[in-house]
């Protein structure tokens, strides 16, 4: 997306129109409110990438299995990567994070390195338990790292989850993680029926 030498109002209009076109081209048919929320996030991100204002807070997308949360956020990341000065955006699968922690000696060092950027955490809550040398994997600790990344560097976190809301996040990760998630992301809901094919 090349939008050089534009004033903020023109850039906002162009970014909004471009992102809506991207979603339509990828087959998304979003409810009006969800379309407005994701477009507003992308537009604010595009403005910040071109030097107009701070980065927006990240997003946590709640919704049932198969609603299209992952695809929506991956397309959002694709749009973000096309902005000037966007930097690296890392996609992490929650299930794999725990598995890799248990298998790879230097996983935490690797995770810290690649997380010095905007990050998408896909399927928060799907990670199983894992440990190495008796030390358990903690998604709550990683969420705390993401909170500090937001506070200190304005690195955005995008999250998709089948968890039903903040109460379930408290149950799984504790009040501290829930409080920090509330500060660094905006919650949105994608309440679409399962899009995956049904076997007869």
Image: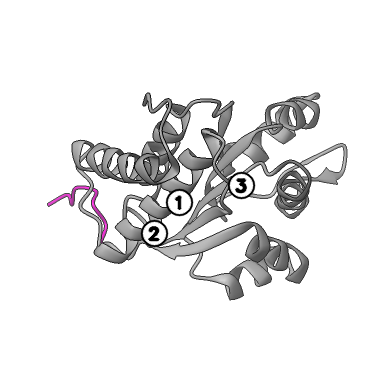
Colour scheme in use: one colour
Residue 173 image point, x, y percent: 70, 63
**The stretch drawn in magenta includes residue 185:** no
On screen, residue 94 versus residue 34, left or right, reads right
- Mark 2 or mark 3, which has the lower sequence index? 2
State how far apart marks 3 and 1 are (Cα): 12 Å
Q: Residue at x 49, y 26 (%)?
A: 84
**Which mark is in front, 2 or 3?**
3
Which segment is the magenta one? 193-200
> Dot 2: within a 10 Å radius of its alpha carbon, few (fewer than 14), some, or many (20 or more) residues?
some
Residue on which disc 1 sits: 41
Asked if disc 2 and disc 3 are in contact, CB closer than 8 Å, the reply is no
Q: Is residue 36 above or below residue 119?
A: below
Residue on which disc 3 sits: 54
Asked if disc 1 and disc 2 are in contact, CB closer than 8 Å, the reply is yes
Residue 59 image point, x, y percent: 52, 54
Q: Is residue 94 above or below residue 50?
A: below
Secondary structure of the residue carrying tag 2 is helix
Q: Residue at x 38, y 45 (%)?
A: 12
> Dot 3: within a 10 Å radius of its alpha carbon, few (fewer than 14), some, or many (20 or more) residues?
few
The disc placed on residue 37 is 2
Q: Residue furthest left?
A: 200
């Amino acid at each position: 997306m090349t939008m050089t030498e534009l004033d903020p109002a023109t850039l906002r209009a162009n970014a909004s129109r471009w992102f809506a076109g991207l979603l339509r081209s990828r087959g998304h048919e979003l409810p009006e409110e969800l379309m407005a929320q994701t477009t507003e996030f992308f537009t604010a991100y595009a403005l910040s990438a071109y030097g107009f204002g701070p980065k927006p807070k990240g997003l946590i997308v709640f919704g049932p299995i198969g609603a299209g949360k992952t695809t929506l956020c991956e397309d959002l990341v694709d749009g973000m990567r096309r902005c000037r000065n966007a930097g690296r955006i890392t996609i992490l699968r929650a299930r794999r994070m725990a598995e890799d922690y248990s298998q790879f000696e230097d996983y935490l060092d690797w995770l810290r390195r690649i997380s010095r950027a905007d990050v998408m955490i896909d399927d928060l809550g799907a990670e199983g338990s894992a440990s190495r040398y008796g030390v358990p994997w903690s998604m709550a600790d990683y969420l705390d790292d993401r909170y500090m990344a937001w506070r200190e560097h304005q690195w955005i976190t995008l999250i998709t989850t089948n968890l039903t809301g903040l109460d379930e996040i408290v149950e799984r990760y504790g009040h501290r993680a829930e409080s920090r998630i509330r500060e660094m992301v905006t919650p949105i809901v994608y309440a679409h029926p399962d899009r995956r094919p049904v076997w007869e």
